[in-house]
Amino acid sequence: MGQWLVIDLEATTEEGGWPIEHMEIIEIGASLVGSSGHEIDHFQRFVRPLRRPNLTRFCRELTHISQADVDSAQALSTVWLQFERWIEPHRPRLQGWCSWGDYDRQQLLQDWQRNGLASHLQTLPHVNLKQRFAKERQLARPVGLNAALQLAGIGFSGQQHRALTDARNTARLLPLVMGK
């Protein structure tokens, strides 16, 4: 299976949700895993939103990310360069990257474009694990991460709606879905 990168993002939002074009990344979590699903390395950074710098109360309560966390963070253009430096030594063994659903891929594409950034991830296949899990389990419709873990007999570990924790929990489903 090689190595896979599991990415989860947290972004600015409000109750009822915002259209993706109004959202900005406020946290990046990535777990690099081997074929058995064990973590080889990880990356976590807060990101300072530029267009709507003040987090809504809903966003702070949902993510447990404080205003101080993002105020003291760097902008995506800086954080993404740190991410690319972090992933560089792993590139030769990296098969692709995945996320739970397609939101993270869309948000990254939008924010790369908006900030004039390029990424090595653009050259790699992206796997929507939410769709792949639903297909594998022959579910009528895709389910949330927590429900998928329960179906797999795995309990959610840690604080939900935090990027690295969500990425790590998603990675726990990787061997069940990609092993075939």
Image (spheres, rainbow, N blue to C red):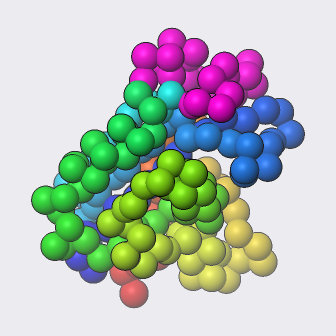
Q: Is residue 67 above or below residue 83?
A: above
Residue 101, x across and y down, in percent:
62, 63
Residue 153, x across and y down, in percent:
52, 58
Could you tell whether 8 is left or right of 172 in the image? right
Residue placed furthest toward the right: 16
Q: Is residue 99 above or below residue 136?
A: above
Could you tell whether 91 is left or right of 124 in the image? left
Residue at figure coordinates x 45%, y 39% from the top left:
76
Q: Nearer the viewer, residue 121 or 148?
A: 121
Residue 77, x across and y down, in percent:
41, 42
Residue at figure coordinates x 63%, y 82% from the top left:
135
Could you tell whether 43 is left or right of 28 in the image? left
Residue 110 in which image quadrant = bottom right
Look at the image and give the residue range highlighted in magenta.
Answer: 49-73
Magenta span has 68? yes
Q: Nearer the viewer, residue 136 or 32?
A: 32
Residue placed furthest toward the front: 116
Residue at figure coordinates x 20%, y 67% from the top left:
91
